[in-house]
Image: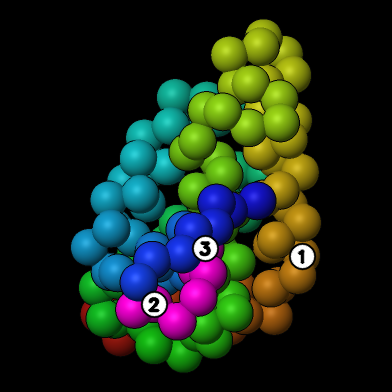
Amino acid sequence: MARSWSSPGNGGSRTASSVLAGNPFQAVRVAGLALQKARQHSASLRSGLNDLLTLIRLIRAWSSGRYHAVPWRTLIMASAAVLYFVNPLDVIPDQLPGIGYVDDVAVITMVASLIRADLERFVNWERGASRDAG
């Protein structure tokens, strides 16, 4: 799902999603790209759109320092799913009409199901935060 690489001093192989999870500025940038792409292709995403938008909001809330109650594993998985969605070179190229986003929706749905409890906690936190602000 995510590209791996090694670099001197990083203690071994790291995935792109783990680097993103450790870099709030890069996370915000990728989340912005994902949101823009999601808006442009919302009809193609159908069932995965709500999960994708929740993953994006989670990454943005963590990146801004507003939400800290997210395990690293969850943050890395959410980042990997969003990175997969943003990357046009995936299993089924996004440019293929009708089927280009099937794999993206599958990845988003799978990741969301694996971290569902953390996503539900986040959504509950969002609801509480909006009540407190209003």
Q: Nearer the viewer, residue 18 or 25?
A: 18
Between circles 3 and 1, the one closer to the viewer is: 3
Q: Nearer the viewer, residue 93 or 8?
A: 8
- Residue 123, horizontal then vertical, whole percent: 53, 73
The mark found on residue 15 in the picture is 3
129 over 80 or under it: above or below: below
Point out the tag, 3 or 1, that comes first from the N-terminus: 3
The circle on residue 10 is 2
Q: Quadrant of residue 68?
A: bottom left
Residue 105 visible: yes
Around disc 1, counting alpha carbons within 10 Å, would you say few (fewer than 14), some (14 to 19), or many (20 or more)? few
- Packing grade of label 2 (10 A; few <14, some 14-19, many >=20) is few
Residue 42 quadrant: top right
- Using the image as rendered, state which of residue 2 and residue 107 is in the foreground: 2
User: What residue did someone put label 1 on?
Assistant: 113
Spatial CA span between label 1 and label 2: 30 Å
Marks 3 & 1, CB-CB < 8 Å contact: no
Q: In terms of sequence position, does the residue under pointer 3 or pointer 2 come before the other?
A: 2
Q: Position of residue 28 (x, y in %)?
A: 29, 58
Q: What amino acid type should be assigned to the residue bearing mark 3?
A: Thr
Residue 47: give its label. Answer: none
Q: Is residue 132 left or right of residue 104?
A: left
SS at circle 1: helix
Which residues are drawn in magenta? 9-15
Report the mark closest to the observer, 3 or 2: 2
- Please report the residue visible at 52 percent of the width from the left and 28 percent of the height from the top: 88
**Amino acid under label 1?**
Ser
Residue type pointed to by label 2:
Asn
Q: Nearer the viewer, mark 1 or mark 2?
A: 2
Residue in the picture at 50% in, 48% down = 83
